[in-house]
Image: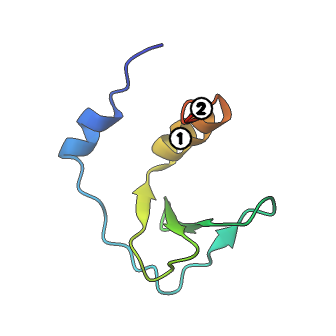
Amino acid sequence: MAESTVGERLADWEQPQLDLTQAQWQSSSQGIGDVQIAFVEGFIAMRQGRNPAGPALIFTPAEWRAFVLGARDGEFDLT
């Protein structure tokens, strides 16, 4: 598997200050829906649904695609 350069790029990348107050958060139709996402100003925001006032992670479209593909491939499985 190729090494990820995302961590290196993020060190130089400043997270945009997005206004998430009007974001339309979406939960998965499968499972409990602890994770919510919203599409805001060309970015993807992700937060914990049980703590909506907490922080949100912000992804570029390329980062989101890498995250989703990694999750589908089991990259983040803890078992």
Q: Nearer the viewer, residue 5 or 36?
A: 36
Tag shown at residue 67: 1
Left or right of 10 in this view: 79 = right
- Please give the name of the residue rendered at 67% of the width and 70% of the height, measured from the top-left corner: 26
Q: Position of residue 45 (x, y in %)?
A: 49, 64
Q: Nearer the viewer, residue 13 or 73?
A: 73
- Please give the name of the residue rendered at 81% of the width and 63% of the height, measured from the top-left corner: 29
Q: Position of residue 3 (x, y in %)?
A: 37, 19
What whole-number distance in Å separates the C-alpha atoms at marks 2 and 1?
A: 18 Å
Looking at this view, name the residue that lies furthest to the bottom: 21
Front: mark 2 or 1: 2
Left or right of 51 in this view: 54 = left
Tag shown at residue 41: none
Q: Are marks 2 and 1 in contact (CB under 8 Å)?
A: no
In terms of secondary structure, where does tag 1 sit?
A: helix
Q: Residues within 10 Å of mark 2 (few under 14, many from 20)?
A: few
Q: Position of residue 24 (x, y in %)?
A: 62, 78
- Please give the name of the residue rendered at 24% of the width and 49% of the height, measured from the top-left corner: 13
- Quarter of the figure with the C terminus: top right
Q: Residues within 10 Å of mark 1 (few under 14, many from 20)?
A: some
Q: Nearer the viewer, residue 47 or 14?
A: 47
Q: Position of residue 40 (x, y in %)?
A: 51, 69
Left or right of 76 in this view: 73 = right
Label 2: which residue? 79
Which amino acid type is shown beneath numbered disc 1?
Answer: Phe
Which amino acid type is shown beneath numbered disc 2?
Answer: Thr
The way the protein has been coloured in the rendering is: rainbow
In terms of secondary structure, where does tag 2 sit?
A: loop
Q: Nearer the viewer, residue 55 or 79?
A: 79
